[in-house]
Image: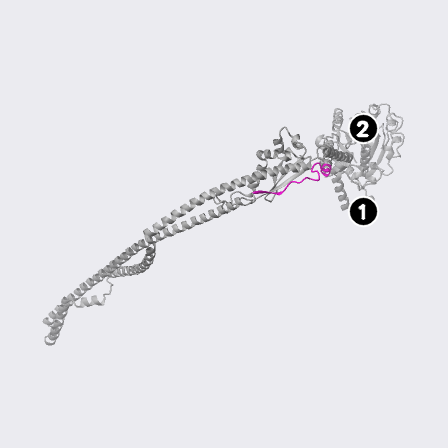
């Protein structure tokens, strides 16, 4: 089996390398716990020291007075808001009073009081200023204004006046002195306001009374001019007449409508000759004189026709002549009747038209009378409404006058009595028994927190400014080097048992063994593009873990039924003999110096038949002798023919050039970096040296990865093995071979 095909059989792991960002807090606490503890202690000490200094040289005592602000009484001369209340609310009053209490005029009056000028004057002592005034003689007014703090009390109509000073009794006296000056000023303002309000209300009351008297006089004149009692009686009569006329108008409208409908019906029947004559009209037609003569002539002819028929016969000429004459009379009678009936229909139509005109005239007359009556009623109603409006206006003005009179009486009572002002003192200032500043608990708490935060910031700064390679992100993202894999810290792997250099055989269920299997898989993927039969494994610093990586890779590849040779090429500190005690004293140096044959130097591994070992042998005098000897190419040719894979455990790349020279002669180089042990600059320099000798740099294995970077993978692989063989103890699981 060829080396390339053998490596290609191993699957490439799908697990991605982690991306390490800023370390978590628990890692900082664990790594820099003594620094954090020292910073916290220093913070406590500094807080205590500051407390002692302030307690000794600058203690402060608090004095506070509380005031109650009452809303202003409503003034009838001022406008009101939409809800009927005064336009100024309690918040505005509080804000105004807070501004007023620190007014320079009030503070100047307070500075002239005994609390500032003679705080401890006795009967037999001279006047002496207070200690506060002595400490602020340069500008006492500005100092007092800055020392006083006025603020409202939430959800109340109260505000407080606070001051801090070294002497508790004098602080209370100063606050009370300012309170007294402020209350006296407010009281004077209150009295002046009452006096102004009383004068304004009195003037408004006199003016209102004059207006009411003038309105009453005008009302009496209007009553006499319009005869209001007579108008009231007339209004009743006019209202009754108007109601009767309205009823007559309705009847006239109904009659006119009926007459119009009757006329339209008669007009249509006349046009179609379908109108039936009334009995009177029919009688007038029948009583027509001409029609009666024709009827009498017809009766006479009928008698003559009867005599002629009896005497002369039916067909006689005389009889026929008489019958023709009778027929003519009948035609004349029919024509006459038709003419008379048509004349009668026209007469009926004219009669209906006259009835319509009469009904319309009656309706118009009735409507005219209603209109005139409504005007009379409106005039009377207007006069009476004007009279009632004037009465209502007089009543409103009288009500306003009554309110002004009550307000004037109330103001007089307030001026005469000792009524409370708008602001009153709820609680005067008293001398404090305990210092307000400094507070030991506060100083200790703040010092501890600040010390802890400073220590944490310093620890984070140390971690963030650390240029050492610590995580896979440093390799892949910052250094932009290929990463074959990473190995966790041994203490972070609870399943790791025995010698870590052969953990693939002793602890196959551990996370470290799984990481080596991933590195083996990635190495197989790299071998698909370019044959890798000879590989140098070297660390970037001493004790970097190259021997552990080389040993486990050799064991893993040997488990895949490959013939693997592991060579200890570190002539300075050989390590493989501690794990493989069967390695003889004859080794690589002896074979190159032709002091021993290759078969004499090779040592098979008892646990793995396909794994062979070659120690370093007798150390050479100079590092260059290993690759510079003429036998080295022949030895490499023999090894390539006898083994599928040859792994060199080389010396660190940092200190000696032996591994650099060897890197140029092998198919690939694997660099091992111990986390937090090598700087990124050193890794770049070694990488540049490998590029200069045109070595095939396969990638880096990050050893002893920090726990905060590998914790996720510990949980990941632990869950994987629990799922795949939960009933099997990790020590009893079968050894993975792929």
Give the CA distance from mark 1 to mark 2: 40 Å
Q: Residue furthest front?
A: 124
- Residue 323 position in % (x across, y down): 13, 70
Horizontal side of 663 relative to 117 (left or right) equals right
Q: Are marks 1 and 2 in contact (CB under 8 Å)?
A: no
- Residue 262 position in % (x across, y down): 27, 61
The color scheme shown is one colour
Nearest to the observer: residue 264 or residue 91: 91
Q: Is residue 299 above or below residue 697?
A: below
Picture quadrant where residue 420 is located: top right
Nearest to the observer: residue 706 or residue 98: 98
Picture quadrant where residue 309 is located: bottom left
Dot label at residue 87: none
Horizontal side of 99 relative to 734 (left or right) equals left
Secondary element at image label 1: loop
Look at the image and give the residue range highlighted in magenta.
422-445
Nearest to the observer: residue 126 or residue 678: 126
- Residue 58 position in % (x across, y down): 70, 33
* Image quadrant in which the C terminus is located: top right
Dot label at residue 652: 2
- Residue 494 position in % (x across, y down): 80, 41
Residue 322 visible in rendering: yes
Q: Residues within 10 Å of mark 2 (few under 14, many from 20)?
A: many
Identify residue for label 1. Answer: 728
Residue 562 visible in rendering: no
């Amino acid at each position: 089996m060829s080396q390339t095909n053998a490596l290609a059989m191993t699957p490439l792991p799908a697990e991605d390398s982690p991306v390490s960002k800023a370390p978590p807090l628990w890692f900082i606490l664990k790594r820099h716990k003594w620094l954090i503890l020292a910073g916290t202690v220093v913070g406590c000490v500094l807080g205590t020291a500051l407390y002692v200094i302030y307690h000794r040289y600058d203690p402060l005592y608090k004095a506070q007075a509380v005031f109650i602000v009452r809303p202003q009484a409503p003034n009838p001369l001022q406008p009101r808001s939409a809800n009927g209340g005064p336009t100024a609310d309690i918040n505005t009053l509080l804000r105004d009073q807070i501004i007023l209490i620190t007014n320079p005029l009030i503070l100047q009056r307070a500075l002239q009081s005994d609390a500032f000028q003679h705080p401890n004057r006795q009967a037999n002592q001279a006047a002496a200023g207070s200690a506060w005034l002595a400490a602020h003689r340069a500008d006492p007014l500005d100092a007092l204004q800055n020392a006083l703090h006025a603020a409202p009390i939430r959800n109340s109509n109260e505000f407080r006046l606070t001051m801090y000073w070294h002497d508790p009794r004098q602080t209370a006296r100063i606050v009370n002195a300012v309170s007294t000056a402020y209350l006296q000023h407010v009281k004077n303002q209150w009295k002046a306001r009452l006096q102004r309000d009383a004068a304004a209300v009195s003037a408004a009351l006199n003016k209102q009374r004059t207006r009411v008297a003038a309105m009453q006089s005008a009302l009496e004149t209007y009553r006499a001019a319009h005869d209001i009692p007579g108008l009231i009686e007339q209004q009743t009569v006019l209202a009754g007449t108007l109601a009767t006329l309205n009823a007559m108008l309705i009847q006239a409208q109904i009659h006119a409508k009926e007459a119009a409908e009757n006329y339209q019906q008669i007009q249509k029947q006349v046009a179609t000759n379908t109108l039936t004559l009334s009995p009177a009209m029919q009688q007038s037609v029948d009583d027509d004189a001409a029609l009666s003569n024709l009827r009498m002539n017809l009766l006479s002819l009928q008698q003559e026709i009867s005599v002629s028929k009896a005497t002369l016969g039916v067909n006689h000429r005389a009889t026929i002549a008489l019958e023709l004459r009778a027929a003519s009379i009948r035609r004349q009678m029919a024509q006459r009747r038709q003419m008379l009936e048509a004349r009668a229909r026209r007469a009926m139509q004219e009669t209906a038209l006259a009835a319509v005109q009469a009904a319309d005239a009656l309706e118009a007359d009735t409507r005219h009378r209603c209109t005139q009556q409504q005007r009379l009623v409106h005039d009377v109603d207007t006069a009476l409404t004007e009279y009632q409006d004037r009465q209502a206006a007089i009543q409103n003005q009288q009500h306003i006058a009554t309110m002004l009179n009550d307000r004037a009486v109330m103001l007089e009572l307030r001026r005469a009595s000792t009524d409370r002002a708008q602001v009153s003192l709820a609680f005067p200032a008293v001398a404090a028994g305990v210092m307000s500043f400094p507070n030991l608990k506060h100083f200790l708490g703040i010092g501890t927190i600040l010390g802890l935060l400073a220590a944490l910031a310093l620890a984070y700064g140390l971690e963030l400014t650390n240029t050492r390679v610590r995580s896979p992100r440093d390799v892949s993202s910052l250094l932009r080097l290929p990463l074959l894999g990473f190995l966790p810290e041994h203490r972070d792997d609870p399943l790791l048992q025995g010698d870590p250099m052969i953990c693939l055989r002793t602890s196959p269920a551990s996370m470290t063994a799984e990481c080596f299997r991933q590195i083996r898989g990635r190495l197989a993927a790299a071998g698909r593009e370019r044959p890798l039969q000879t590989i140098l494994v070297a660390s970037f610093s001493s004790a970097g873990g190259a021997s552990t990586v080389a040993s486990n890779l050799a064991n893993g590849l040997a488990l895949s039924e490959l013939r693997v040779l592991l060579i200890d090429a570190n002539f300075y500190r050989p390590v493989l003999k501690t794990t493989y005690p069967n390695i003889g004293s004859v080794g690589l140096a002896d074979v190159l110096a032709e002091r021993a044959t290759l078969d004499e130097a090779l040592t098979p591994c008892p646990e793995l038949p396909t794994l062979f070992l070659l120690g370093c042998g007798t150390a050479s005098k100079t590092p260059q002798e290993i690759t510079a000897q003429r036998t080295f190419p022949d030895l490499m040719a023999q090894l390539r023919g006898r083994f599928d894979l040859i792994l060199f455990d080389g010396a660190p790349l940092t200190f000696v050039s032996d591994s650099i020279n060897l890197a140029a002669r092998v198919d690939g180089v694997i660099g091992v970096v111990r986390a937090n042990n090598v700087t990124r600059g050193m890794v770049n320099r070694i990488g540049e040296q490998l590029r200069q000798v045109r070595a095939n740099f396969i990638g880096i294995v990050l050893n002893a990865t920090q726990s905060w970077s590998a914790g996720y993978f510990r949980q990941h692989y632990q869950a994987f093995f629990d799922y795949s063989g939960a009933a099997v103890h990790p020590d009893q699981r079968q050894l993975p071979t792929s």
